[in-house]
Amino acid sequence: MSHKTLSRLEHHVARALSAIIHDMKDPRLPIVVTVERVRLSPDLSQARVLVSAIERSEETAELLNHAHRYLQEELAHTMELRRIPRLRFFAGPGEVL
């Protein structure tokens, strides 16, 4: 897969995940969770997702890692991909405010 195609797909996955996370009804999640970046492996088997929140970015990444199967299922319903990547969430630089 070309770098341009992979980059475009990363952008689409980030937008889809952002919408899915926004619609989650988990009261433990902060009100605003931002998907900063998605990095897909060349074979699309894994995705590293950088998320940030105004507070508790580490806890937010941990909660999303626990919900990764749900998020993968929702991503499969949202996007038409041959293979849905395994999602791994990492905290980003969101606690600046």
Image: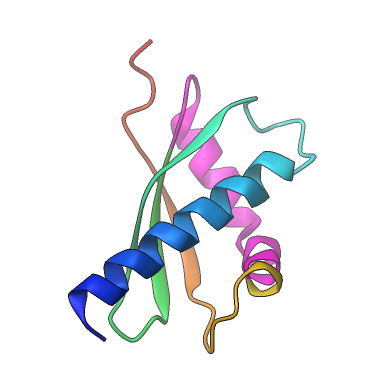
Relative vertical location of residue 21 with respect to residue 34 in this rendering, above or below: below
Let me know if residue 55 is in the magenta part.
yes
User: Is residue 12 shown left or right of residue 71?
Assistant: left
**What main secondary structure does the magenta stretch of the protein show?**
helix
- Residue lying at the far top in this picture: please name it: 97
Which residue is nearer to you in this view: 25 or 76?
Answer: 76
Relative vertical location of residue 82 with respect to residue 67 in this rendering, above or below: below
Q: Quadrant of residue 80?
A: bottom right
Which residue is nearer to you in this view: 14 or 51?
Answer: 14
Q: In the rendered structure, which segment of residues is drawn in magenta?
A: 52-75
Please identify the quadrant where the N terminus is shown. Answer: bottom left
Which residue is nearer to you in this view: 5 or 70?
Answer: 5
Query: Image point 65% across, 25% down: which residue?
Result: 31
Please identify the quadrant where the C terminus is shown. Answer: top left
Give percent across and percent down for residue 67.
Answer: 66, 56
Give percent across and percent down for residue 11.
Answer: 39, 58
Let me know if residue 51 is in the magenta part.
no
Query: Image point 66% across, 40% down: which residue?
Result: 22
Give percent across and percent down for residue 5.
Answer: 29, 75
- Residue lying at the far left in this picture: please name it: 3
User: Is residue 57 shown left or right of residue 19?
Assistant: left
Query: Image point 49% across, 65% down: which residue?
Result: 87
Relative vertical location of residue 23 with respect to residue 10 in this rendering, above or below: above
Give percent across and percent down for residue 60.
Answer: 54, 37
| Colour scheme of the picture | rainbow
The total number of labels drawn is 0
Query: Image point 76% across, 38% down: which residue?
Result: 26
